[in-house]
Every structure is written in C-alpha cells, then in structure tokens.
C-alpha cells in the first residue's frame, strides 16, 4: 500500500487500509489489481479524476483538425488568377490542411480535356516540393479532381 504522501506503507489487510483512508478523510484506490499482492493507494479520487480530465482536455486542445480546402480551376485560368490560387494552395498546405484541386470543364471545353490535364501537370510541378499527391487526377463527370496533402517533416 502507498500512503497519502506517496510513501510506502507496506502490506496491510483490507480493513486496516480502509481504516487508514477513512482516518485521513481520503479514498482507498486500487492501482494495480493484478499484482501480488494488489497495490492500493490512499488519495482523493475526485481530485484525481478531475486532474486526469483536465490533462485529457489540454491534450485535445493541442491537436489540430485537418480540414479539406477546395480550389477550383478552369482549363482557361490565366496566369494572374493561377498565381493567386497557387499562393492560396501553398498557404493551405503550410497550415497543415489537405487541398482538393478541381478543374471544371464547361460546354465545349469537354472536347479539350488535354488542356485540363496540362493545368493539373503545371500545378503538380509548381507544388512538387511542399506537397504529396494523395489521389492522382481523375474525372468525375465534368470535372477533374486531385487531392493534395502537405509533406510530413
């Protein structure tokens, strides 16, 4: 048995340990039930539970939720707009978010899907150093979709 101050008390009967805990105004908590003999400790169990809950909450707050951001391109996206979207893409990756890149085709653009493929290859080449491609470009109806995740350091 371990005392309230963390000191080693020794091997006691169950009744003696319960009496010591009641005298101290604390609880008798079984720490290692499979040990021979089982190890118990005198402590304030409510305070112990509260501290554990506080630690779990702090650990949960430190974790970051990964979001999926979406960037939409067109096969005819000009350089100025392309550079703005590329800058946003890099910012999303730096923040640790995944990015879904969509190249949308309208009307007769479907006849020239090679322009969309060139756009996707250009994006891949520009972000090669700071990202990992999770899913390569594939067609979903009238749009080409690609998933990109930040590189792990």
Image: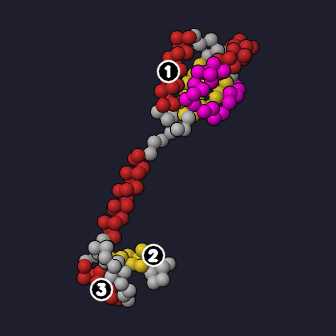
Relative height, residue 77 to residue 43 (above, below): above
Label 3 residue SS = helix
Label 2 residue SS = strand
For the residues labelled 1 and 2, the Cα–Cα distance comes to 55 Å
Relative height, residue 89 to residue 74 (above, below): below
Q: Residues within 10 Å of mark 1 (few under 14, many from 20)?
A: few
Q: Is residue 110 visible?
A: no
Question: x%, y% of residue 108?
Answer: 71, 12
Question: x%, y% of residue 18?
Answer: 33, 84
Query: Is 69 contained in the magenta span?
Result: no
**Disc 1 target residue:** 87
Question: x%, y% of residue 141?
Answer: 70, 25
Q: What residue span does the magenta drawing correspond to?
A: 121-141
* Horizontal side of residue 1 vs 77, given as left or right: left
Q: Is residue 146 visible?
A: yes
**Disc 3 target residue:** 19
For the residues labelled 3 and 1, the Cα–Cα distance comes to 69 Å
Label 1 residue SS = helix
Q: Residue at x 60, y 26 (%)?
A: 128
Q: Residue at x 42, y 74 (%)?
A: 31
**Disc 2 target residue:** 32
Relative height, residue 132 to residue 107 (above, below): below
Q: Nearer the viewer, residue 36 or 142?
A: 36
């Amino acid at each position: 048995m371990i005392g309230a101050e963390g000191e080693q008390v020794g091997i006691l009967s169950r009744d003696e340990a319960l009496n010591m805990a009641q005298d101290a105004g604390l609880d008798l908590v079984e720490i290692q039930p499979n040990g021979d003999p089982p190890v118990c400790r005198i402590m304030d169990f409510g305070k112990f539970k509260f501290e554990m809950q506080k630690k779990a909450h702090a650990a949960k707050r430190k974790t970051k939720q990964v979001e999926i951001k979406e960037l939409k391109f067109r096969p005819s996206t000009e350089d100025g707009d392309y550079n703005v979207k590329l800058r946003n893409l890099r910012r999303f990756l730096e923040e640790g978010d995944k990015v879904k890149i969509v190249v949308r085709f309208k009307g007769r653009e479907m006849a020239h899907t090679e322009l969309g493929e060139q756009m996707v290859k250009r994006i891949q080449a520009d972000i090669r150093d700071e990202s990992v491609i999770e899913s390569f470009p594939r067609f979903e109806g009238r749009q080409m979709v690609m998933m990109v995740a930040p590189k792990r350091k």
